[in-house]
Image (tube, rainbow, N blue to C red):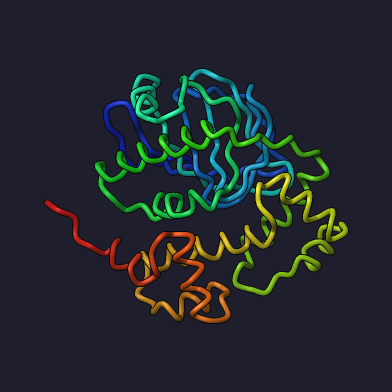
Amino acid sequence: MAHLLASGAGWRVLDIICTAGPGDRVFEEQHAYCCIAAVASGSFQYRSAQGTALLAPGSLLLGNHGSCFECGHEHATGDRCLAFQFDPAYLESILAGVPGARRLGFSRPHLPPSPALAALTAEMEAGGGDAASYEELAIRLAGAVASTLAEGQPAKAAPTTRDARRITRALRRIEACSGETLTLSQLAREAAMSPYHFLRTFKGVVGMTPHQFLLRTRLHRAALLLRRSEHGVAQIAFDCGFGDLSTFNRRFRLAMGKSPSAYRTHHDRPRAS
């Protein structure tokens, strides 16, 4: 199910909810536009001419105009993505202003969750803006992806089916229970893996360690609550799994570039008419 959030000349943003599961047939599809899709929840396997990847919350799916792809849910059901779609000429006009971006076309299927993009992905998911704000997000996202690719971040090898199944379960566990205490030993035990092998495999598949992903999930949830609720900062910190307010404030500032209070105030400002 796809819901159009906003559109303009050369771009559009859709909220896409997929309910497919392990028992559903996988179909080959084709990208009608250049696509950058941020995974908001769930996980799935993405296959394109650029490679195969397991996409987790915070990951960015990259799709080239006209290329064929498949999205599979072999190990768990459902996901939600915010898909930013660009006409090739519009995207090329953005890339022309990004240092080091040499050509149109993504060379890899995805980018893993990244602390550098944490504030931007939280802002995208919070949404609620007008067409002008969504266009600004689309341009910032395309520029950030082009800059990351220009820096030559190494691509991750595709996970084996067994590793993908185990790590998918761990991702879903962290996503559903991020406010709880989840230790590496506990997650490894549930995955039927040794702690070292689980840590190495998780980082290889997701692009960050289990603790980093748990922290990213907590901070992302906190950022959304700061924008969407009237709860106090301390309550949000404790509800999201942080044991004390000072630790939450420090980690939030490092990830989002502002203190929680300043982040809330910034996004509560009325827009200029």
Q: In which quarter of the image is residue 163?
A: top right
User: Which residue is at the far left?
Assistant: 273
Q: Is residue 10 above or below residue 247?
A: above
Q: Horizontal placement of 263 versus 19: left or right? A: left
Q: Horizontal placement of 52 versus 67: left or right? A: right
Residue 104 percent location from the top left of the image: 46, 20
Residue 226 percent location from the top left of the image: 39, 68
Q: Is residue 15 above or below residue 248?
A: above
The residue lying toward the viewer, choosing from 62 and 255, is 255
Residue 251 percent location from the top left of the image: 51, 67
Residue 24 percent location from the top left of the image: 69, 38
Q: In this view, does 71 lie above or below 210?
A: above
**Residue pictured at 35% horizontal, 36% vertical:** 139
Q: In which quarter of the image is residue 98?
A: top left
**Residue pictured at 41% horizontal, 40% vertical:** 141
**Residue pictured at 48% horizontal, 41% vertical:** 1
